[in-house]
Amino acid sequence: MATIKKLLIANRGEIARRIMRTCREQGIATVAVYSEVDASLPHVREADQAVCLGPAPARESYLVIDKIINAARETGADAIHPGYGFLSENTELAAACDKAGIIFVGPNARAIEVMGDKAAARQLMAASQVPVLPGFDEDGATDDALTQASANVGFPLLIKAVAGGGGKGMRVVNTANEFAESLAAARREARNAFGDDRVLLERYLPTARHVEVQVFADNHGNAVHLFERDCSVQRRHQKIIEEAPAPGLDEATRNAFGEAAVQAAKAIDYRGAGTVEFLYAPATGEFFFMEMNTRLQVEHPVTEMITGEDLVAWQLAVAADKQLPKSQDQIQRCGHAMEVRLYAENPEQGFLPSSGLLEHLRWPHELARVDAGYESGDRVEEYYDPMIAKLICFGDDRDAARQKLIRALQSLELNGIHHNAPFLLRVLADDAFEQAELDTRLLEHRPQLMEPSKTDPALLAIAASRILATRNPADSSPWQRLAGWRAAGQHFQMSLLQVDDQCLSVREEDGRVSVGEQSHSLICTLDEASFSLHWGHHGLQGRFHIIDADSLLLFVDGQAHCIARNPSRDSAQQGAQGGFVAPMSGTIVALHVEPGSTVAAGDAVITLEAMKMEHTLRATEIGTVHDFHVAAGDSVSEGTLLVEFEATADA
């Protein structure tokens, strides 16, 4: 039986910190690895030792196996845990660990190879009588072969990377006319994310649920499941909200899912943690194998909460050649758990990735389990996946967990980057989600969820005015009161405030508060960091963070609002640029047209990659593309002019 005394975690961010937490409880020393831009992140600070792997791009740091193995040797690590993403499903890392005499906390190389190759996994499951979707999975198929096969598979279909997961290298294609461009984009994205541009085709089910089963197996012939999770709420094939158990399943269906998943694990002599993912059609009760992830999943905390088990501890036990901690009969579940993924992205610009300094950050630890890769003052870079944290809540039933998660997101304080917390709140409060009317296209069925939440700026101004007046002792001085003095003995208070990008004046007089033409009585209560106000029939609640005597941040429904008192009157504005500007920081991948070309609305002009996802900028009207200011491979910052464009004048 092996012993793990020191563990190297070949990953970054929240999963590295999550693994370290279990290691500390078990007295196992930890080694962090990091790229040059990650040197100051919490996972580096919290480890017992840390090794720099190189430059920011993952292909030069986190994806270099020799650097990982050398770091383990130099620090005397007994074992390597790959986390998820990066090298977590890489057979070469597993083989390299074996050759170096280092324990790999994961399955054997054969299991990774078979299940990591989505085409081979489909073929194995079909041979094992596990139902699979109609598709085309010929290994090494050319573009021509895939194009011909697409007609037989039928539309809509899904192009899916053979290697990897997480929505990378995946495209839904609705018509034959879209296929060539989608195939090229899927191949590029797969190659950039996994170093492998092979893809397969599957029939796409527009209305289905994504249900997955957590499995575990050891080297002693034991294999169990720890129940299922529902991960149907997705955007761009990436999970957004996960929960366990899956709502609305009868016990016979739950058992069928569990038995099929365990059978899949046994078919490849599996070891360690794995997740078998299915598409489930509630109308018929049928389910179809999608893939098996041979690693710990991002959403593993919801399973931990309903079972009371530490899945990382299970992984370490199996890696040390121990038997599974519990048999199938001993594993129990209770209550309901729900998780949201907090992404650095801008919902108001099509969820484009965002990067920057986390100027102010307070996690709602008192309301939720928070697995976070960042703390206040850290910087989110554009080189990696945009997920910055997970918030997880447990309740006696689904609605209790949902309500707790809503309160946790409402208490989040995050400023400095764009993020999706307001969007997550809209989804959690949506009637369809509340009633568990789930499928993988929920967000397409509910377009109103994509509309940004708006808070009345007048209410924000009133709250800010009252908070600044109450929290700043200088406001009570005679000099501050002088501006509101009248010879008749009456007093009024006037504040000029800039609320985000809008200037408003707040006037308090004779017990009433006026903003513009509106005037109402005000009831406002404050505590150390939160506020609640009622202004006539309007109400607002939130949290605040004071920056200085004349500025503060208000956090309402997950959104940060910057407010300054007595703002500068300078109003110089930058003129509009006649062309395409970078909507986020990233790397130019492709220029689709030549300078001087005429393009129609919808034509692809330029593609850039950020946070491992490709984003294609298209013409919104007929016009001429003039000079490009960038070339493929260039790194650009948000707001950079990429190409000059001149719209065609109306005839």
Image (cartoon, rainbow, N blue to C red):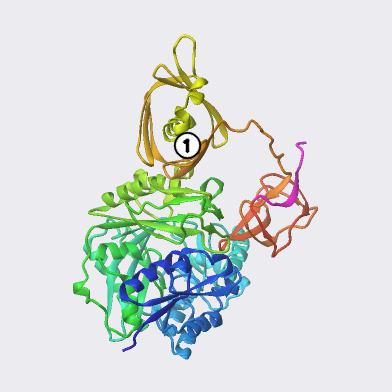
Please state the extent of the stretch shown in magenta in the rendering: 639-651
Q: Nearer the viewer, residue 188 or 452?
A: 452
Residue at point 39% right, 19% down? 511
Residue 521 vs 250, above or below: the answer is above
Residue 198 visible within the image: no
Q: Residue at x 32, y 61 (%)?
A: 302
Which image quadrant: the N terminus?
A: bottom left
Q: Nearer the viewer, residue 647 or 385?
A: 385
The percent position of residue 540, horizontal first and vertical second, equals: 39, 34
Where's residue 510, x and y in %? 41, 16
Q: Is residue 368 above or below residue 623?
A: below
Q: Give residue 110's position: percent from left, percent from top.
A: 43, 84
Relative to 161, is 407 on the left or the right?
A: left
Q: Residue furthest left?
A: 329
Nearer the observer, 464 or 202: 464
Residue type at mark 1: give it: Lys
Q: Residue 172, how many percent across, how many down?
A: 52, 60
- Residue 650 lies in magenta, yes or no? yes
Q: Which residue lies under the disc numbered 1?
A: 454
- Identify the secondary structure beneath mark 1: loop
